[in-house]
Image (cartoon, helix red, strand yellow):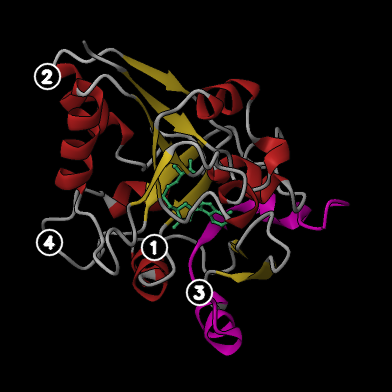
Amino acid sequence: MTGKAYLVGAGPGGLGLMTIRAREVIESADVILYDQLPGEEILATLPGSAELIDCGKYGGNHTLEQQEIETLMVERVKEGKTVVRLKGGDPFLFGRGGEEMETLREHGIPVEVVPGVTSAIAVPEMVGIPVTHRRYASTVTFITGHEDPAKPESALDWAVLSRLKGTLVILMGVKNLPKIAAVLIEHGKDPSTPVAIIERGLRPDQRVTVGTLADIVDKARAVGVRPPAVIVIGGVVELYGGSNE
Ligand code: SAH
């Protein structure tokens, strides 16, 4: 008797931007593995009838490693359970959902993926910044800022990224922002390129900091920018100032 696994996107925050399919799947779950990214409003509605596993604080203070999360999912499904792995935004965009799918498949476990509204698009959008716009950007590139750009073995080609004319959207980039801004300028990106940092998008304490590649680091430091935040680099930032704020 084998259960089933779902890799579910919770959306960028708030119940309104979660899909109906995600809600249905959550209601049917025996086990839900989650972390804090989906936000309080969503986490407060997880059904008490399910086994709720906080991957950030498992059994007290222990943070589950990726390997442990995958092992737990496999174990529970093999017990015949319906297992939901709930992730902020979309499960496959910088969410390690792809790796979880691979592991589940290796164990012959049926997987359904439930796409989610990604923060990479929705968070800027909700403050009036479209990631593409005919006048400003015909391409958009999603970048993980998690990697130290100074590392020679970095998987990211900053010389190429600096030359792109479209929008750059950086997730997980708060810590490395000083290095990222420096490396982009070093590779020739115009220091006057507009930049917006949107912290805690769609949460009551959302905050937006706007500047240019040249001054954003000082501005971010002055206000004490913290993760989670989406960083948008490009002309589209000029459109900031949506009615949703
Ligand atoms: N799969 C997720 C991204 C996971 S990586 C998605 O599709 O949205 C985690 C990063 O996402 C954070 O470090 C931050 O850069 C971004 N993020 C997710 N939700 C956010 C939110 N509500 N506000 C600001 N940034 C957010």
Q: Is residue 221 magenta?
A: yes
Q: Residue 106 carries which label?
A: 2
Point out the stretch of residues depicted in magenta: 216-245
Point 27% across, 61% down: residue = 59
Quarter holding the N terminus is top left
* Closer to the camera in the image, 203 or 146: 203
| Image coords of residue 179 (percent x, y) | 34, 72
Can you name the residue that lies furthest to the front here? 49
Distance, label 3 to label 2, CA atoms, is 37 Å
Does residue 53 sit above or below 211 in this rendering?
above
The residue indicated by pointer 1 is: 184
Provide the secondary structure element on which disc 3 rests.
loop
The residue indicated by pointer 3 is: 226
Can you name the residue that lies furthest to the bottom here? 222
Label 3 vs 2, first from the N-terminus: 2
Provide the secondary structure element on which disc 2 rests.
helix
Label 1 vs 3, first from the N-terminus: 1
Mark 3 in CB contact with mark 2 (< 8 angstroms): no
The residue indicated by pointer 4 is: 152
| Image coords of residue 85 (percent x, y) | 38, 35
Q: Which amino acid does label 2 sit on?
A: Glu
Mark 4 in CB contact with mark 3 (< 8 angstroms): no
